[in-house]
Structures are given as C-alpha cells and as structure tokens.
Image (cartoon, grey):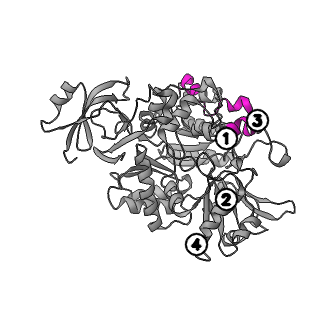
Amino acid sequence: MSTENKIYTNGHIMTVDDNNRVVEAVGISGDRIISVGSLKKVQAEMAEDATVVDLHGKTMIPAFIDPHGHFPDPGFIDLYRADLASPPRGESTCLADVFRLVGEKVGQTPVGDWVMGAALDHTSLMEGRMPSRDELDLISTEHPIWVIHASGHCGSANSLALERQGISEDTQDILGGRFLRDANGRLNGQIEGISAMAEMGDTHFLINSERFKDGFDTCREEYLRHGVTLAQNAWAPTSLLQMFAEVAEQGDPGIDLLVLPIAEIEPEFSESGLGSRWPDDSYIKLGPRKLFTDGSFQMRTAYLTEPFFTAQDGGTPDCGLPYVEREVLFSEIKKLHDMGFQIHTHSNGDAGSDMLLDALEAALLANPREDHRHTLIHGQVLRDDQLARMHKLGVTVSFFSAHIYFWGDKHYTDFLGPERANRISPAGSADRAGVRYTIHNDAAVTPTRPLHLMHCAVNRKTSSGRVLGEDQRISATSALRAHTIDAAWQVFQENERGSIEPGKLADLAILSDDPIAQSDTLDQVRVLETIRRGKTVWEQG
C-alpha cells in the first residue's frame, strides 16, 4: 500500500497507554502515529486522502520490544552452525544425535576450517553431559570443532580447537572460568565461563563482515515475523561493534537495534574510540553498558547463597561461582555510573545479585542519580528482600521467563529444588514490591517468540505441564506491558515507542486474537502482520 496516510479501524486496538485504553481507530502518517481514539475523532484529525484499513475484528497492539537478546546470533546459527537444540526446539535427544549433526557440518566444511555447533543443552540429553574432546576428535582431527552450550556459558572443544586457541595441559583455571579435566588430570575439552572461553564465547566467533550481514538479514526476518521491531544485542565487544557500525553506515537496516558495549572498553570507547563517532540518528543505537556477576544454572555457575539442589557427578552440591571479584565489580559499576551510563548486569544467582546491589548502592550513595534505570538481567532467584532493596534503589529487572518452560522441570528436580524453583523469575513478587520489570527470551538461548514468552510469565507451565509458583503468575495485561511499553521505558525510549499514542513511531503488530481474552492459550495467538515506521514489513501469507 503506497498511501502515506492510513486509518486502521474495525478491530480491537490495544493502546497499552497509561490507562490501557482500547480504541476504535488509529491514524498514521509516514512513520508516526497522528491520532488515536474514536473513528470520528481520527478521521477529523487525519488528511482527507487517508486510506482506511479494515482490521476485520483482529487485534492491534504496539510492536514488541526485545529487552534482552543477542541479535543477530539466531541468524548465525541458521546459516553457519550445526543446530544442536533438543526438543521442543530441536532434535538432539542423545550424544549420538549431536555427533551426527556435527559430522554433517564437518562434511560440508573444507579441511582445516572451523566447525561450530550451537544451542546444545546437555541437561536434555539422555547422557546428561557435554561431549568430550576425545569424542569430538573421533568426528574429525582435521577440523577444529567447538560446540557451545545453549546458555552461552560453556562449550566443548576437540584437540585441534584447543591447540588453535593456545590451550594446553599447563593452562590454569582463571577467575570466572574453568578448564575441566578427566580422572587422570588431562583436559577433557570442556571449558566453562566467559573468561575461559575467551573469543570462543563471543556470539560472533568465526563471523566476518560478509557473514555478519547475511546473519543480520536472516535474523531480522525472524524478529519481524514475530512482531519485534526493536531488537537488542546485549554483549558487544569492539569487533562486534565495528560490524554493527558498518551496517549502520548503509542506512535503514530494516529493524531498529540497541547495542550494548561491554564495560571493559570504557572510557576509551566513548571518549576517543568508535563510540565517540557513533551517529545519534542511527537506526542502530548504543544502549546501556554491560557487565556480568556470574554464569548459568545449566552449568551450575550461577552464584547462589544456598547450594544447588543436587550435585553433578556424585559430588557435593556447591553454590556456583562469581565471574568477577567484588572489588572489580564495585570499580566497574562506579566508573560507568559516574560516566552517566545506564548499566545492564547479567546476574542469575541471588549471591551474584547481592554483590551487584551492594555495588550499585555504593555508587548511588557516592553520586546520586534520580532516574538511572540500572537493570538486573535475569534475576532468576531474586528474594523478596532483594526486590524491596531494588525498589528503594530504583533498580529495574528483566526476567528470563522462558526458563520456566524450557528448564523449569530441571530447576525443580536438579538445579534449585521445589521451593526455589517455584519462584524462579518472580514477576509476581516484583509486582508486589513495586519493581518495574520486563521479560525476555535471551535469543538465541531461547528463540524470539514474544507471545510464547508472555504465556510463560502468565501461566508458568514447564514443558511437562507442571505449574511453578501460582503466586508468581502475572496478568496477561502485565505481560503485554512488560514486552512493549515497559521494555521501551527500561531503555529510556518510552517517549518514542512501546504504546499506541500520538507522536510515537508507527510500530504496530496485528494479532489473530486478543491476548488478554486468550490468556490461558497465549502461545496459540499468532502475529498476522508487523508494521514498522508506518510500513508493513511482514505479513502472513
């Protein structure tokens, strides 16, 4: 449709404004929303040549916003890596499946070139473990092979991959990272922690500019298909930032992006590096700076105050580990806070969150900032006292609610036990504490599926059908706000997007059903059309 002025009506138009109004019509001109309200009002405020678009009773909402993810990593997996995901996402149920899929990728790859597998979840495999170095050597000793876990926090390498990365039998563990060994003390190929994985832990490992652009285009189509018009890359070192800058220089990339530089490159990045030259009007904008306190639950590297419910390999349950020394975290938080940046910090375990809140409180006491919106990412086992403290400090949180479905059963039986598992991603408690929050998929850890994610937060059902924590359920309205206007607010974009209000970007999604009326079956609601900046960018069929 070429007409610049349009009026959408005859549908269920959910504005997600402060009053959650449902209106009769919305008028847009170019890339902006001009009028919202009754059809008579909108017609009076729009140009006479506006085209009327009949919604045929369907539901219109503001487009979804990704509060935390790793765009365009899903595109890299689709195009360049062996996808080793287990059901319900993929087909790997045992190590034999993993070896077959990696072997197929080896057969497609020139000798000497890297082969990478991704999205492997050892907790969903029959054997319950990661592949070993020797097993990967049986697939190929002429290709370096690296298989990274779905969490992004560990992986397994064959002998040639270890050699290429300079990892030898003399290599020692480092803070936040471990090089695992067999019963004889020999490296078994498994590497845990971002610090130990080094560049192999980067989402863009083995990606050059050409591959980046192809992966970008593939990932963009997936996001638009599911109604997402603002994506995020939440861990961007300098090399990845340069690739984003190259795309930004070419004009509109077809999706808006927020890119989070890693904390360690500051202040040089912003004072004299690429950040100092980043265009303010780019579709790809720089967002908060990113830190870590700990790792993941699947690898038992989340940092807890109480031990994991069970232990691996018959050992004694431990409390995981921090990824950073307390003094270093305090220093990094203070540096970024004093520079005026918003800070997003990956913190899974409650011990990691204690450390983070201590650091944020110290920075705020030394240098008060009224509206900082520092954000705790994941917060899967936040306690009520921590949420009360966050409310007092003005700290917000983004919950990884998809974990309830994909790993909730493992939390219940293995990672946390029934009591703590019943309050993972405690959005209900956040509501009661007055802490504003969002929900995320952390793609490519779990796929970008906003309506399924809302379903997880509202119904809290695991993949087996177990309900985890009735008192942590939230309303479908709260879930919709968490993925639209609250997600915009969390990154200071609430005046630009996130609700259907005059003056905002015309970023909209048309759904098959009303998500509020269909709260019990949110995962069955479908996106029929995605509108970005006033133009249809994806449409079913």
**Residue 98 - label:** 2
Q: Amino acid at mark 4?
A: Thr
Residue located 35% across and 43% down the image: 530
Mark sitting earlier along the chain (4/1): 4
- Residue projecting furthest to the right: 184
Q: Secondary structure at mark 1?
A: helix
Q: Tell me the mark number nearer the camera, choosing from 2 and 1.
A: 2
Looking at the image, is 240 positioned above or below residue 423?
Answer: below
**Span colored in magenta:** 409-434
Spot occupied by residue 322 in the image (x, y as percentages of width and height): 70, 46
Q: Secondary structure at mark 2?
A: helix
Which residue does the numbered mark 4 point to in the structure image?
A: 109
Residue 354 falls inside the magenta stretch:
no
**Mark 1: few/some/many CA within 10 Å (<14, 14-19, 20+):** many
In three-dimensional space, the C-alpha distance between marks 2 and 1, rounded to whole angstroms, equals 33 Å
In three-dimensional space, the C-alpha distance between marks 4 and 1, rounded to whole angstroms, equals 41 Å
Residue located 74% across and 33% down the image: 417
**Mark 2: few/some/many CA within 10 Å (<14, 14-19, 20+):** many
Q: Amino acid at mark 2?
A: Val
**Residue 306 - label:** 3
In three-dimensional space, the C-alpha distance between marks 3 and 1, rounded to whole angstroms, equals 12 Å
Contact flag, marks 4 and 3 (Cβ < 8 Å): no
Q: Tell me the mark number nearer the camera, choosing from 4 and 1.
A: 4
In three-dimensional space, the C-alpha distance between marks 3 and 2, rounded to whole angstroms, equals 33 Å
Which residue does the numbered mark 1 point to in the structure image?
A: 352
**Mark 3: few/some/many CA within 10 Å (<14, 14-19, 20+):** some
